[in-house]
Amino acid sequence: MSNMRMILLEAALVAGVLMTGLSASQIAYAAPLAAAATDPQADVKIDSMIRVERTAESENGETITELVDPATVKVVPGDRLLFINRYHNIGNKDVTGFVVNNPVHDAVAFVEVLEDWALLSVDGGQNFGKLPELRVTDGEQASRPAVTSDVTHIRWVLPSPIAPGASGELRFRGTVK
């Protein structure tokens, strides 16, 4: 199979996996620090989606960015993707200490996280921090500062309680490799 065909298959896989939703793809998962059956954190539901960012020219000549459902377009290497995790507290109690972990798929190059308080991992989700604080080990002893292409996971620790009925979004961008 040619490299281009493999890349296109990976792009289709990324779009397909991400569109299947949270429980099927495990792309993002709620990771309460100590969840129990009666824990109100179980009342926070997450829906994951992906959108392809496409630029177009408006009638007056301005460049606009549209968010397109990947099921409606051909997704190819280089396409910009917006990953969205929507959360909603369907319970009747505030939820504190809520954590969302989101692995970055191998066929996606991480670009940026839209919430500046999010934490990143460059070691498969073992350690998290801000990108300038992270280092990547090359070989046995040598290390270098981490860069965006090293990011393997994103973690959001919601800074405020999620009130009953409250909802929000956690987002990051990537490109199809």
Image: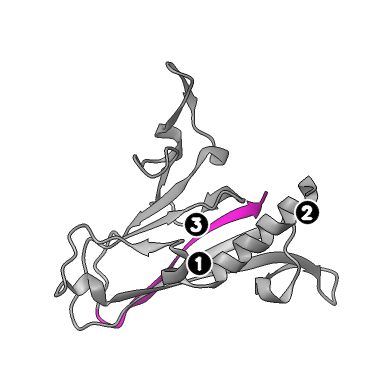
How dense is the environment of label 1, judged by Cα within 10 Å: few (below 14), some, or many (20 and up)?
some
Q: Is residue 66 above or below residue 81?
A: below
Q: Residue at x 62, y 65 (%)?
A: 15
Q: Which secondary structure type mostly characterizes the magenta part of the structure?
A: strand
The reply to whether the C-beta atoms of the residues labelled 3 and 2 are less than 8 Å apart is no
Task: Determine whether the residue tagged by mark 1 lies in a helix, strand or loop.
Answer: strand
Question: Which quadrant of the view contains residue 28?
Answer: bottom left
Residue that badge 3 annotates: 114
Which mark is first along the chain, 2 or 1?
2
Q: Which of the two discs, 3 and 1, sits closer to the camera? A: 1
Residue 5 is situated, as x and y percent measured from the top left of the image, at 78, 53
Numbered label attached to residue 93 = none
The amino acid type found where label 3 is placed reads: Leu
Taking the magenta stretch, the answer to whether it contains residue 103 is: no
Q: Is residue 159 left or right of residue 142?
A: left
Q: Residue at x 50, y 42 (%)?
A: 151
How far separated are the C-alphas under marks 3 and 2? 31 Å
* Viewer-nearest residue: 169 or 46: 46
| Residues rendered magenta in the picture | 164-177
Task: Determine whether the residue tagged by mark 2 lies in a helix, strand or loop.
Answer: helix
How dense is the environment of label 2, judged by Cα within 10 Å: few (below 14), some, or many (20 and up)?
few
Q: Is residue 145 above or below residue 114?
A: above
Numbered label attached to residue 84 = 1
Residue that badge 2 annotates: 5
Q: Is residue 154 visible?
A: yes
Residue 74 is situated, as x and y percent measured from the top left of the image, at 76, 67
Which mark is first along the chain, 2 or 3?
2
